[in-house]
Amino acid sequence: MLRTTPADSLENKWDDVRAQQMSEAEKLLYRSNLLGSDKRITNFGGGNTSAKVTETDPLTGALVDVLWVKGSGGDVGSIKMDGFSTLYMDKLSALKELYRGVDYEDEMVGYLPHCTFNLNPRAASIDTPLHAYVPAKHVDHMHPDAIIAIAAAKDSKALTRKIFGDRIGWLPWKKPGFELGLWLSDFCDRNPDAQGVVLESHGLFTWADDAKDCYELTLKTIQTAMDWFAENSAGLAAFGGALHTALPAEERDQVAARLMPVIRGMISGQQHMVGHFEDTETVLEFVNAKDMTALAALGTSCPDHFLRTKIRPLVVDFDPSNPNLEKTVKGLEEAVAAYRLDYTAYYDRCKHSDSPAIRDPNPVVYLVPGIGMITFAKDKATARISGEFYINAINVMRGASTVSTYQGLPEQEAFDIEYWVLEEAKLQRMPKPKSMAGRVALVTGGAGGIGAATAERYLKEGACVMLADIDEDALADTAERLASQYSADAVRAVAMNVTYEGAVAEAFAQTAREFGGLDILVSNAGIASSAPIEETSLDLWNKNMSILSTGYFLVSRAAFKMMSAQGLGGALVFVASKNGLAASPNASAYCTAKASEIHLARCLALEGAPKGIRVNVVNPDAVLQGSKIWSGDWLKERAATYGKDKEGLEAHYRERSLLKRSVFPQDIAEAAYFLASDLSSKSTGNIINVDAGNVQAFTR
């Protein structure tokens, strides 16, 4: 952040005792991870680091100089040793003789694999020449907000000189690549005492001959900029001062939950998108400011910013002083359509004969006065990171516009980065999306055996999952386990009693705020009871009906509302029971409630079909493993019904089945995956029995 106080000072985390045991390459990794651990130093995936290390050539046994540099697509904060490319320095130097000029610089990337040391498979970054041709042994290239605020100012060269003197130089904007590497080399030759350079509209390069010195120089340079902004912007209104006042947090949440499914439906034509909502102080200051609309229209400056956020955001028409949410919702379709037309015109103005085809023309960032910022991307992590990058852009605009005049990157330059053939090649190398990429699921009873197994099955296929359960302790444990195993971005949890209308509404609103909407509902929350009819109390009857029938109705109604708002269709999967089709002694309340679930699914399949909402049922039987309903009286009661002890009940169920096999939570999850996935896109109103075979439960 640019509003710096002593408590905001960058921390020198270098540990001499730890570092003294490291090789030069290991020190590079150590330095990289330290720098990447603080987002004030560089954003996720932004910047790169390098070290020139003496190695033994595996062919000749001779000592050679090798460039270790962050490989293409890595992140310095989380990089490991295998994330670095390694290249012979003499071969990199020899490339200068092959260079045919700026019009041909892209072809130089094809030569980098020929410079690889020790058959390292890590692809070299386009920034490799920038590191190779700086004579110092250690080089850091970071994207700190404080430095980019200088780099994006109209008088950035003068500001650089004013803040750093001769210690840090300045170079005008140039797209990263071989030519910029030569510029840096020339700068170093002409300024042998310089310790770094600010690249206009881009970031910071610093260098030294010692790993620790380089790390500390990078921190010192960024801290100098942060301190300068703190001193020179004190008392000045950012972004022209406030125009709007933020609504209370609860109201902001409500507006975001209403807007996000609508937006998601409009922009998910090519693929399902996932949303993220931010209403931090930094975001609210910007969206409520007088100059927000004008600054947003200028676009972002740093290439990393607009590659993640597109060149500019969409400002949503919403007046927090006179909120009319329905008017805003109605106006969104026209606003998004206008953005698409504007983006297409931008593409047509700037494209070259060899430009890649136009990509998704929908906005990524949505700024809502009084509410906050919404971002959408192909998955939750990308949506969150896109929001982080736009916050970086906000910080840059704050700094530059407070002490000077902010300027975005020229349109053609921005396009040439966004539609760079090399950038397109990187996108084409990305792995194929998983079958549920971009899909959002809510699983009730998510802390139980079947619910957790189903959530895990969806997560394996790339979905985002909201776990809902009444058992808060079990819910937290399940969410933590799945988040650590898959992705903290993709897993959320909400405590919910399916029989409380308000709790259901809030759980679905929270799903919308966390992920942007909903594609899949797995209605699985349940109980089980066993009692002869004479001993079945009205309370027991009502409890079964409340949870297993009314609860399924409430969550289904909420799902239909959200899916209808999106217009993307969807899938409801009811986890019912063999007992919904086959009568069972001493369980009339349970069996009747389960039959109600099945018939509700049939009714909803009729209503959902015109909207593309499919509703299907999985009927398990005797899933003892991991099931919470078998941990109480139900187990004892069913054992007594069949004249078995607890240990013999599972064997009893297995032997009574046609296939003589036990049924596990993962078996139910597989059916729930099939019914929610595109594999069953032409199926609705169906029942899949996963019971190892029970003739009484045959559906025909």
Image (tube, grey):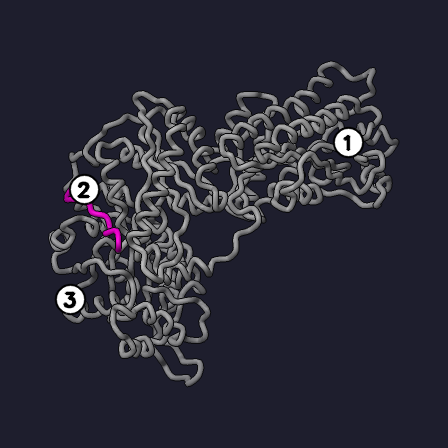
Q: Is residue 43 magenta?
A: no
In the image, which disc is placed on residue 241? none
Span colored in magenta: 402-412
Report whether 295 appears left or right of 118: left
Q: Mark 3 or 1 closer to N-term?
A: 3
Crowding near pointer 2: few (<14 within 10 Å), some, many (20+)? many
Determine whether the residue tagged by mark 2 lies in a helix, strand or loop: helix
Please, is residue 391 above or below residue 605 in the view?
A: below
Q: Which residue is mark 2?
A: 401
Determine whether the residue tagged by mark 3 lies in a helix, strand or loop: loop
Which amino acid type is shown beneath numbered disc 1? Leu
Q: Nearer the viewer, mark 2 or mark 3?
A: 2
Residue appearing at x 32%, y 56% in the figure: 351
Q: Mark 2 or 3 closer to N-term?
A: 3
Q: Position of residue 354 (x, y in %)?
A: 35, 62
Residue appearing at x 18%, y 48% in the figure: 153
Q: Which residue is mark 3?
A: 193
Picture quarter containing residue 85?
Answer: bottom left
Asked if one can make out residue 17 in the rendered structure from this viewpoint, the answer is no
Assess whether mark 1 and mark 3 are in contact (beta carbons under 8 angstroms).
Answer: no
Asked if one can make out residue 97 in the rendered structure from this viewpoint, the answer is yes
Which amino acid type is shown beneath numbered disc 2? Ser
Q: Which residue is mark 1?
A: 635
